[in-house]
Each structure stands twice: as C-alpha cells, then as structure tokens.
Image: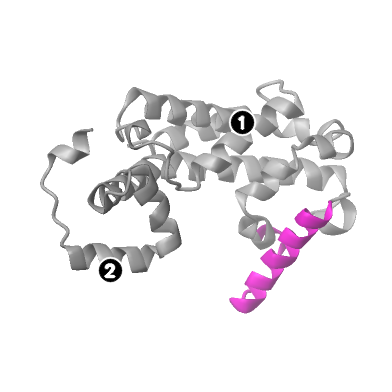
Amino acid sequence: MASQARTFIYSEAQIQALERTISPKRFSSYVLAAAGDKSLAVLLYERNTSLSESLYGVLQGVEISVRNSANSVLSAGFGGADRSDRAPLRAPEQEAIFRARRELDIDGKYETPGRIVAELAFGFWTALTDKRYARSLWVPYLYKAFPYRRMSHKTAHARLEAIRKAAQPRCPPRADYIPEPRSGLLRYRRDHTLDLSGYCSLGFKRPVACSRN
C-alpha cells in the first residue's frame, strides 16, 4: 500500500486526539479495517479524506443539476414549487422538507421554494426515484428530469444511490481496497457520476467536468 511507505508523522498523543475528534465509534471502523493497527487506521482516514476531496466537485455539480432538474419538472407538473402540498410524498420525504424549513428558520433565513430545494439533501431526490414513487412521480413527471438519456426509474435510482453513497465518506471493508486519489478506478467513478449531470443538462456537464482534480 503506497501510503504505508511514507514517514508516519503522528505521535501516540496525536492519534488519541484524532480518535476523540473523529469519535471513537467512527475511528473504530478504520481500526477494524487496519486489523487493529491505529497507525495504519490514521493513514486510511487520510486516504479516505483525499478520495472524498477528489470527488467533491463532481458530486456537488451532479447534486445541483439533479435537484434543479427534478424540482423544475415537479413544479411544472404540480402547478407550483411547493411540492410538500401537491406531490404525494411519503412520510420520510415530508419529514425531510420539514427539517429543511426548520434549518432555514434556525438560520434566520426567509423561506423560499429555492432555499428549501437547496437545503434538501441529495438523499431526498434519490428517494423520489424509488419504486414506491414509480407510478405517482416517475412515470408522469420525473423521467423528464433526465431529457438527454432515457432511463427506467430502476436505473436512475441505482445511479443516484451509488452517487449518494460515494458522497458519504466511510471506511471500506479492507485496507487494500482503497484506490489512490488519481487511480483508474476513481477516474471511472468520477466519469460515471459526471455522465449523470449531462443527462439533466448538456450545458452543465462541461463546468462540472472542470471541477475534476
């Protein structure tokens, strides 16, 4: 593993401080992947952070293109931007909108449809492509959010779910599984994610591509 070859710069006290900062529960997943070696666990954490940084620009761009495109077609379909009153959303998605509004209130921001949309997590939009929304949202409306690629709700959901998981830093099951930040595997993941932004907007794909490291 390439990162093991470099000089380890953390003292025992610094490792303990890092563990407290990350949280013992989260750090324990890295320790488990490193077979109990806390020094290696720190290197795994560093590598995972580098991977997240490498993907951030593309993930952010895809999130913007997907949520705005989905919001646009739903707004047109239900005659306005307030989907919580018009779209047949399940309880978890209703709760997500409630949390978004609460966050705006806590931050002292005036509530607008655009701000609510921006506050909603990527998982909200992913959930709307689930099979439980196939008849009520996907078939009549949401398929139009991807005008440059015909997809079933199953394909859209699988791709969005993969992106959602990629956006969440987590410790992989094996220390030797983590790819280098500029590896072919990571480039494949970035390119695969980038394609999705192009399905929503051909014009938006280029600036998103420019965010790649």
Quarter of the figure with the C terminus: top left
Of residues 184 and 177, the one drawn nearer to the viewer in this rendering: 177
Q: Considering only vertical position in the picture, is 126 above or below 21?
A: above
Task: Please name the residue shown 53% across and 35% down the image.
Answer: 204
* Residue type beneath disc 2: Ala
Residue 93: within the magenta?
yes
Q: Quadrant of residue 44?
A: top left
* Residue type beneath disc 1: Arg
Of residues 140 and 9, the one drawn nearer to the viewer in this rendering: 9
Task: Please name the residue shown 27% across and 49% down the image.
Answer: 37
Residue furthest front in the image: 36
**Magenta stretch, overall SS:** helix
Residue 176 pos. (x, y %): 32, 32
Which mark's residue is nearer the viewer, 2 or 1?
2
Colour scheme: one colour
Residue 48 pos. (x, y %): 36, 45
Residue 97: within the magenta?
yes
Q: Which residue is mark 1?
A: 159
Please indicate whether residue 191 sits to the left or right of residue 176 in the image: right
Q: Evaluate whether residue 111 shows in this view.
A: no
Q: Quadrant of residue 145?
A: top right
Q: Which numbered disc, 2 or 1, marks the residue that appears first in the sequence? A: 2
Task: Please name the residue shown 55% across and 37% down the image.
Answer: 163
Task: Please name the residue shown 77% across and 40% down the image.
Answer: 73
The Cα atoms of the two marked residues, 2 and 1, are separated by 37 Å
First to last magenta residue range: 90-114
Q: Evaluate whether residue 38 shows in this view.
A: yes
Quarter of the figure with the N terminus: top left
Please indicate whether residue 146 sits to the left or right of residue 26 in the image: right
Which disc is residue 17 wearing? Answer: 2
Residue 69 pos. (x, y %): 68, 40
